[in-house]
Image: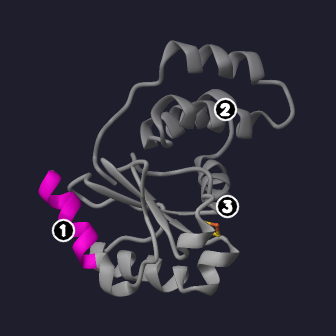
Amino acid sequence: MNGTTEQMTPEIRAFIEEWKSKPGNLIMVLHKVQQTYGYIPRDVAIETSKLLDVPLAKIYGVVTFYNFFKLQKAGKYIIQVCLGTACYLRGGDDVIKEFEKQLGIGVNGTTADGLFSIEAVRCIGCCGLAPAAVINGEVHGKLTTKDVAGIIAKYRELG
Ligand code: FES
């Protein structure tokens, strides 16, 4: 958690009102929340629980079940490591584990300084460069675990 607090916007409040009695409303509302903030802020989750009359534990159950939802705001640099078939077969899994180890966070986590997030993605269309990763639109290809420290250092330097 990065400790930021977020207020529920009037748009989300209105959206909840609109969806309150419809089936599947929790997922719809959570999508709307993530679309607005980029993640599911705790304060907004609490507010949603009250307005929809759904236990907070159920909301967190849904959020953690689907990888799509994020519990933290994304970092300045989003390291998207490809785990599509070509990349996976060429060691993409080891590369992502090395990023996790060196940054001390898991997939979908964000470092405490807000600089980095790690995401696992499917084929990014650069299979010839497998294993590949995209960081804020920049493609890094033919990665090995040995490249990870240098990549992190490069972005850290940019600040
Ligand atoms: S599988 Fe990774 S770029 Fe295609």
Of marks 1 and 3, the one in the foreground:
1
Residue drawn at the location 50% of the way across and 69% of the way down: 132
Comparing marks 2 and 1, which lies closer to the viewer?
Answer: 1
Pick whichever of labels 1 and 3 is earlier in the sequence.
Answer: 3
Hey, which quadrant is residue 111 in on the image?
Answer: bottom left
From the viewer's side, name the closer residue of 14 and 93. Answer: 93
Magenta residues? 149-158
Q: Given the image, on which type of amino acid does mark 3 rest?
A: Phe
Q: Position of residue 81 (x, y in %)?
A: 50, 67
Of residues 97 and 153, the one drawn nearer to the viewer in this rendering: 153
Q: Residue at x 66, y 70 (%)?
A: 84
Q: Give the crowd class for mark 1: few <14, some 14-19, many >=20 residues within 10 Å.
A: few
Secondary structure beneath dot 1 equals: helix
Q: Which residue is mark 1?
A: 153
Instruction: Name the residue tied to disc 3.
Output: 65
Q: Is residue 37 above or below residue 140?
A: above
Asked whether residue 154 is drawn in magenta, I would say: yes
Mark 3 CB lies closer than 8 A to ligand 1: no
Residue that carries the numbered disc 2 in the rendered image = 29
Q: How far across and down, in percent of the image, does residue 15 sit?
A: 66, 18
Mark sitting earlier along the chain (2/1) = 2
Vertical order, 8 against 39 (above or below): above
